[in-house]
C-alpha cells in the first residue's frame, strides 16, 4: 500500500483516542438494542404471532430508515470534515440545514407506514394471521417517524463534535423511557391488561419527544446551535447538496442490502410463523454480538472524517487498522460465547425445543458471519469519510443481490433457516474481502487528497 503522508500542521484536536469516541457509542447502541430486545421479549410472552409481527415490522422499519440514514451519514461526514478543517461556521449551517430535510424525510416514511402497510406485508408474504396485528402496529408507529429522523441527525451532529458522552446521556433518557413505558403499556398495571404490541408504539412516540427536547437543549448549550423556525422546513440547496452527495451513495448501499435482506425475510416467512419467530430471536441476539464492531465503525468514520479534513492520512490509516483488529477480537470472541450459551439464551424467548435447536445452529454459523461483518462495519464508513464514497456500493451490490438475496431464497428452499444463514455468512465474507483490499491497497488516498483540496476552496 502507498504510505499516507501526514500533514505537519494537522491539529492534535482531531486525534483523540478511538476508544474515547467508541465507548459512549457502544452505550448508545446497547440501549437501543436493549429496547428492541425488550420489545421482542414482551411480544414473545404475548404469542409467537406477536413476536413474528414485531420482528417483521422491525425489518420494515430498518429498511425505511435508510431514508434517514441518507441524512445522518451525510451530515455526520460533512460536519466532521468541516470541523477538521476549522470551518465551524459552515459546520453549523450544514447541521441546521439537515433539520429541514429531516422534516420531509420523516413525513415521507410516516405516509408509507400509513398507506403502504398492506402492500408491504403482501410483498413480504406475511402469514395471514399476522396482518391485522402488524397493520395496526405500523399505523401507530407512523407519527414517531418525524421525531426519529430529527433524533438520528441531531445525534450525528453531536458525535461529529466529539460530544459522544453527551449523546449517550440523551440516549439513556430516550431509550430508558421507551423501555420503561413499553413495559407499562404492553403488560398493563393492576386490572388494566395493557395494549400488547401497540403499547410499544405509543412508548416509542413519547420517548422520541423526550429525545428531541434533550437534543435541542444540548445543541444550544454545547455547540451554540439554536435552530430557527425556518430551519425546520426549508432545505437550503448549497448546504444540503454536500450532505446528499455523501449520504445517497452510503444509503443506497444500505438500501440494496435491506432489499436483499427483505428477500430473505420473505423466504423465512414462507417457512411459517415458527421460523419467523426463530429468525427474530436469533437476529436480536446477534445485535449484541456486533455491538462493539458497529460502535468502532461509527467511531472510525468520525475520526477518519476529522483526520482527512486536517490532512492527516497516516493517522487515519492507523485508526482503521486498529478498529478492524479490535473488532475481530471482540466480535469473534462474543460470537463463540453466544453460540455456546445459545440453549440457555433462547429460553428467554421460548420454551419450544425445535425453535431452540434451530437457533443454536444459526448462532454457530454466525461465528463466521460476524467475523466477516467486522470489516463491513468498520471500513465502508472510513471509505466514505475519506471521500471514497462509491466503492462500497459498487463492490457490494452484486454480492448483496446474488449471494444475500437470491442465495437466501434458493438455500432457504433447500435447507430452511440454516441455508438462509449460510447465505448471510457468504455475503458478509465476500464483501469483507473486497473492502479490506480497497483500504489496504490505498485506493482511498486519491479521494482523500481531493477532499482536502475541496475543503481549502472558498465556500
Image: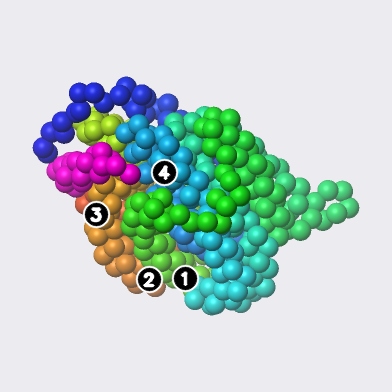
Categorize mark 3 by other alpha carbons within 10 Å: few (<14), some (14-19), many (20+).
many
Q: For this rendering, which residue is in front, 265 or 47?
A: 265
Viewer-proximal residue among 89 and 296: 89
Residue 88 x, y percent position in the rendering = 41, 34
**How many tags in the picture?**
4
Q: CA distance from mark 1 to mark 2?
A: 8 Å
Which sits earlier in the primary sequence, circle 1 or circle 3?
A: 1
SS class of the residue under badge 1? helix
Residue extending farthest to the front is 458
Task: Measure the C-alpha gap from mark 1 to mark 4.
Answer: 33 Å
Q: Which residues are magenta?
A: 438-459
Q: Is residue 436 above or below residue 219?
A: below
Check contact, mark 1 vs mark 2: CB within 8 A. Answer: yes
Instruction: Please state if 446 lies on the left or on the right of 316 as rendered.
Output: left
Question: Percent x, y for residue 273?
Answer: 57, 68
- Residue 249 pos. (x, y %): 33, 57
What separation in Å lies between label 1 and label 3 (alpha carbons)? Answer: 28 Å
Query: Disc 4 or disc 3, which is closer to the eye?
Result: 4
Q: CA distance from mark 2 to mark 3?
A: 26 Å
Q: Nearer the viewer, mark 1 or mark 4?
A: 4
The residue pinned by badge 3 equals 391
Tell me the residue that label 2 is attached to.
Answer: 409
Labelled disc at residue 360 = none
Residue 244 in sight in this render: yes
Of the two numbered discs 2 and 4 in the rendering, the one whose residue sits closer to the viewer: 4
Q: Earlier in the sequence, mark 2 or mark 3?
A: 3
The N terminus: image quadrant? top left
**Residue under the image location 67 percent in, 53 percent down:** 205
Q: Name the residue: 26% across, 65% down.
A: 398
* Pointer 4 residue: 76
Q: Nearer the viewer, mark 1 or mark 3?
A: 3
Q: Is residue 333 magenta?
A: no
Amino acid at each position: 500500500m502507498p504510505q499516507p503522508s501526514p500533514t505537519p500542521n494537522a491539529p492534535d484536536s482531531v486525534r483523540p483516542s478511538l476508544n474515547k469516541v467508541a465507548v459512549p457509542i457502544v452505550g448508545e447502541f446497547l440501549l437501543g438494542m436493549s429496547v428492541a430486545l425488550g420489545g421482542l421479549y414482551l411480544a414473545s410472552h404475548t404469542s409467537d404471532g406477536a413476536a413474528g409481527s414485531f420482528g417483521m415490522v422491525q425489518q420494515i422499519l430498518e429498511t425505511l430508515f435508510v431514508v434517514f440514514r441518507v441524512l445522518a451519514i451525510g451530515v455526520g461526514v460533512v460536519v466532521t470534515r468541516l470541523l477538521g478543517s476549522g470551518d465551524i461556521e459552515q459546520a453549523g449551517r450544514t447541521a441546521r440545514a439537515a433539520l429541514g430535510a429531516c422534516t420531509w424525510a420523516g413525513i415521507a416514511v410516516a405516509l408509507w407506514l400509513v398507506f403502504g402497510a398492506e402492500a408491504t406485508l403482501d410483498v413480504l408474504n406475511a402469514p395471514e394471521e399476522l396482518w391485522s396485528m402488524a397493520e395496526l402496529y405500523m399505523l401507530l408507529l407512523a407519527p414517531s417517524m418525524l421525531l426519529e429522523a430529527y433524533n438520528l441527525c441531531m445525534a450525528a451532529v453531536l458525535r461529529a463534535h466529539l460530544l459522544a458522552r453527551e449523546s449517550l446521556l440523551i440516549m439513556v433518557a430516550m431509550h430508558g423511557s421507551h423501555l420503561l413505558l413499553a413495559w407499562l403499556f404492553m403488560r398493563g398495571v393492576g386490572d388494566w391488561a395493557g395494549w400488547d404490541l401497540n403499547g410499544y408504539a405509543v412508548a416509542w412516540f413519547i420517548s422520541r419527544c423526550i429525545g428531541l427536547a434533550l437534543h435541542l437543549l444540548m445543541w444550544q448549550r454545547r455547540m451554540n446551535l439554536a435552530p430557527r423556525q425556518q430551519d425546520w422546513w426549508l432545505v437550503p440547496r448549497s448546504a444540503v447538496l454536500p450532505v446528499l452527495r455523501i449520504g445517497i451513495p452510503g444509503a443506497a448501499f444500505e438500501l440494496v442490502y435491506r432489499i436483499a435482506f427483505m428477500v430473505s425475510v420473505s423466504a423465512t416467512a414462507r417457512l411459517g410463523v415458527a421460523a419467523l419467530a426463530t429468525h427474530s430471536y436469533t437476529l436480536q441476539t446477534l445485535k449484541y454480538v456486533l455491538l462493539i464492531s458497529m460502535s468502532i465503525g461509527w467511531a472510525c468514520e468520525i475520526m477518519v472524517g476529522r483526520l482527512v479534513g486536517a490532512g492527516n492520512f497516516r493517522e487515519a490509516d492507523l485508526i482503521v487498522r486498529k478498529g478492524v483488529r479490535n473488532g475481530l477480537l471482540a466480535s469473534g470472541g462474543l460470537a463463540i460465547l453466544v453460540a455456546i450459551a445459545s440453549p440457555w439464551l433462547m429460553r428467554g424467548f421460548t420454551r419450544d425445543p425445535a425453535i431452540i435447536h434451530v437457533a443454536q445452529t444459526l448462532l454457530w454459523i454466525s461465528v463466521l458471519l460476524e467475523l466477516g461483518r467486522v470489516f463491513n462495519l468498520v471500513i465502508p464508513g472510513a471509505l466514505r469519510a475519506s471521500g471514497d464514497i462509491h466503492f462500497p456500493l459498487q463492490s457490494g451490490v452484486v454480492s448483496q443481490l446474488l449471494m444475500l438475496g437470491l442465495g437466501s431464497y434458493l438455500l432457504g428452499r433447500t435447507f430452511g433457516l440454516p441455508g438462509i444463514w449460510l447465505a448471510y455468512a457468504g455475503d458478509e465474507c465476500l464483501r469483507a474481502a473486497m473492502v479490506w483490499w480497497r483500504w489496504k491497497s490505498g485506493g482511498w488516498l486519491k479521494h482523500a487528497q481531493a477532499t482536502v483540496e475541496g475543503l481549502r476552496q472558498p465556500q
